[in-house]
Amino acid sequence: MKKVIYLGIALSAFLISGAFAGDYHDGATLACAECHVMHYSQTHGYNSNGTGITPDIGTAGPYDFLLRNEINDLCLSCHDNQTFAPDVLASNGGNVPTNGRQAGALNRDNTAPYFDADGHTLGSAAVAPGGTFTNAEGLNCADCHRPHGSSTANYYRNLRGGNVLYAVGTNDLTKDVFELSASMGGDHYGIQNVAFNEPISTASAYAAFCQTCHTNFHGSSSDANMRNTAGPAGEEWYRHPTADANIGALGGGHSSLTTFSGKAYRVQVMSPTGDWGTWGSAWASAPADLTPSCMSCHKGHGNTQAFGLIWATGAANYGENGDGDSYKTLCGQCHRQVRP
């Protein structure tokens, strides 16, 4: 019996009502039978007459932890090409918002247009770039998500590490993420329905989550892996900061708030005041405390561009992949040295 690490993330249609955001597998919506089977022999549902929708069990079991299937197959039984749960794999229908998924899409089989180089690859045993994390049995959903939620807090998307907190419907500037609507419609996970606060000006909880695997790529202006504080002003950065570096703060030939705010379709940044401007319109008076982080340039799961980068020009609704022809258009979101 092949060993698996932990319980996968799966949803079922008959319990989706009333749940929202990342805490579905938590509290009242933590339904054991959606992911576990007692005797690996189930042939009917849980209603007294044998009816009821239940996820299929795999053909190579029984599986560790009484799971219905191998972990990734179990998660994808609900999270791939379904309409009742977020579709997180490639782009083959399911529940994909027209304005693009906030996290983009995972890849699994290195086939066009979602190659291994374009984001997180399910089943990969490769070492995470910038860190030491690896899963010898292959990357699975529970490496990044808490399958049973948390007893202490509602974490955004049930993410592990970083402790990313969120608010739904009404913003809370002490939380890291703001989801504009609690509706579980097709746009619930779309980029226009998700915004990022900045509760701590020197940190990013979202980046801290990514840092649990990609260690060296994250930090603020005081971290040695990111910046040589003894170096010449404006030349001291080793890596692009993920916190504590506001757009346009250095002045000179570096990032420009005028460049960023002049675009109608800007990449997502953190705002301590909850002011992100109007999507689709240039920004007449952007605040000077907007901070880029991981989500500004990358899709968490990936997309059809190398490294999950968003090639966004700022001239059109860019969706998951962007509307540009190279990574240069992404850099041009903030940096005025970049020319079309």
Image (cartoon, rainbow, N blue to C red):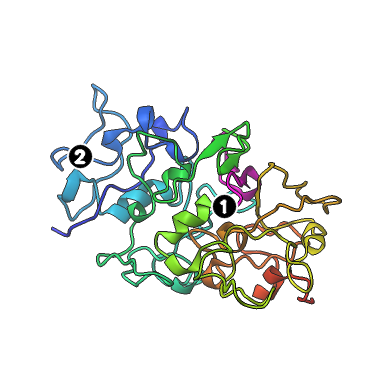
Residue 114 appears anywhere in the view:
yes
Look at the image and say whether residue 184 sits in the magenta stretch: yes
Quarter where residue 153 is shown: top left
**Percent from the top left, x then y, of residue 178?**
60, 40
Find disc 2 in the rendering and name its residue.
37
Q: Position of residue 67 (x, y in %)?
A: 22, 46
**Label 1 amino acid?**
Arg
Instruction: Please state, as top left, top right, bottom left or bottom right, where the C terminus lies in the image.
Output: bottom right
Q: Nearer the viewer, mark 2 or mark 1?
A: 1
Q: Position of residue 276 (x, y in %)?
A: 72, 47
Q: Residue at image x 43%, y 37%?
A: 23
For the N terminus, the quadrant is bottom left
Q: Relative to 326, is 101 above or below?
A: above
237 to the left or right of 164: right
Distance from Cα at disc 2 to Cα at disc 1: 31 Å
Write down the residue under mark 1: 101
Q: Secondary structure at mark 2?
A: loop
Depth check, front residue: 339 or 203: 203
Q: Quadrant of residue 184?
A: top right
